[in-house]
Amino acid sequence: MSTMKKIRLNWNRVFNKRNYFTEIVKDDLNFQKSLSVEEQTLYRKWVELSKDVKFSFNVDTLKDNIWSPTDISNMELTISEVKNLEPYVDICRTSEESTLWNVYRRMLSSASYSPNPGRLIRSYVRDRVSGKILGLISLGSDVSSLRVRDEFIGWSKDNRFVDKKINHSCIGTTIIPTQPLGYNFLGGKLISVLTTSEEFRKEWYERYGDILVMVNTTSLYGIQSQYNGIPHFKTLGVSSGKIKLTPTKDVFKRTKKWMDKIGVSIEVKDDTKMISARKQNQLGKMCKELGIKVGKYNSGYERGVYSSMMYTNGKEFLCGKINESELVLNERYVNGDEKSINWWKEKCIKRYQKLMEENRIKDETLWYSPITKMNWNECKQTYLSDIGR
């Protein structure tokens, strides 16, 4: 066979492969675009548990570790049990603890999970009396650029990166309550306020050598979320721009593998970004190579942005106007988590009483392991109503 013929055959193989991967990426993105925001969230969860993640043991054995009232229909008993709860932050410090936390994260949340690069602290929120799990928290490296946050602080690019003040800020990437605590007892608000716990400030300083001044987070859907009405968090607005849909893990992985094989790299060097931001940049490079207009595939929703400034003069510090020794802790946090927990208990009992009066209690423990044996239609029928709960 002549050299020219070999070159022509090789080119045809690459051309045909390119067409193949272009079509599977477009099909994947078009299907996701056809779904509602809630369906998109659940679909990615279904793909994660039915295709992407395998467990080496029976995860249902962990379900008994989730807190639940003895008899949620017994109002007097349940209120007594809630009043006796002693929530505390239990930080994961070993790789084994972190691995187990990852399993709980996948079983308890309707959102799929990809750990962020960079700094990351995983934690349970447990009841000190029973040892049961009330929720999960992970705090990680903050987003490199977030317009409403930067405007709120008065942050310049030099403040963030030259002065390294972004190291004194974090983002809550997982802030989820267990069920039935979440829906019936405003458990999401409890887990949210405990992101500001002294335990995290201590751990951040011990691990990374920086004082943690600010906790930021975003909602899954728009400006309405569990963070509303919490005195610890200020609503800053919505994230600018639309979030681009990304191919599901299997499609993305196979396409990237082929692109690596033909010498096309979509790697992103900036490890300070959240994994979602890195994926967005990688997707842009992938779609450019495949001739896909990535702007056609926005998710169609914005995220609410929330911030907790734990020091009264935190803005001044983050802008380089004062030094660490001049920071003044907000009075709300001076005596540990007690004030935050008491604030939550008062709110959650009123919520529970109202739901009881209206006969709207949901008493089941939400646990996503059955998805592993479901097709997409079965998953949607079973779990769609629980998205965002």
Image (tube, rainbow, N blue to C red):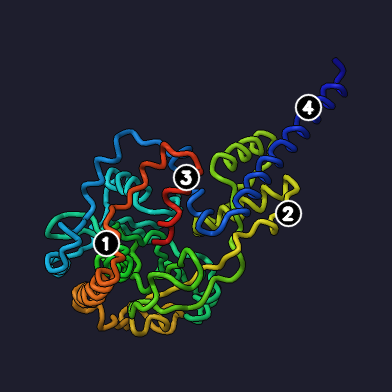
Q: Which residue is mark 4?
A: 10
Q: Earlier in the sequence, mark 3 or mark 1?
A: 3
| Depicted 326 relative to depicted 55: above or below | below
Q: CA distance from mark 2 to mark 1?
A: 43 Å
Query: Which one is earlier in the sequence, the residue at label 2 or at label 4?
Result: 4
Front one among 96 and 58: 58
Label 1: few (<14), some or many (≥20) within 10 Å? many
Residue at (27%, 62%) from the top-left corner? 181
- Residue 216, x across and y down, in percent: 42, 70
Residue occupying image coordinates x 61% and y 65%:
242
Residues at marks 3 and 1, CA–CA distance in whole angstroms: 24 Å
- Quick one: label 2 or label 3, which is nearer the N terminus? 3
**Label 4: few (<14), some or many (≥20) within 10 Å?**
few
Dot 4: element: helix
Q: Nearer the viewer, residue 263 or 284?
A: 284
What amino acid is found at the position of numbered circle 2 in the picture?
Lys
- CA gap, disc 2 and disc 3: 26 Å
Which amino acid lies under the numbered mark 4 shown in the image of this protein?
Answer: Asn
How far apart marks 1 and 4 lie (CA) works out to: 59 Å
Name the residue carrying label 3.
46
Q: Given the image, on which type of amino acid does mark 1 rest?
A: Leu
Q: Nearer the viewer, residue 363 or 169?
A: 363
| Rendered residue at 30%/40% (across/down) | 59
Return the residue at label 2: 293
The residue that label 1 is drawn on is 181
User: Where does the N terminus fall, quadrant-wise?
Assistant: top right
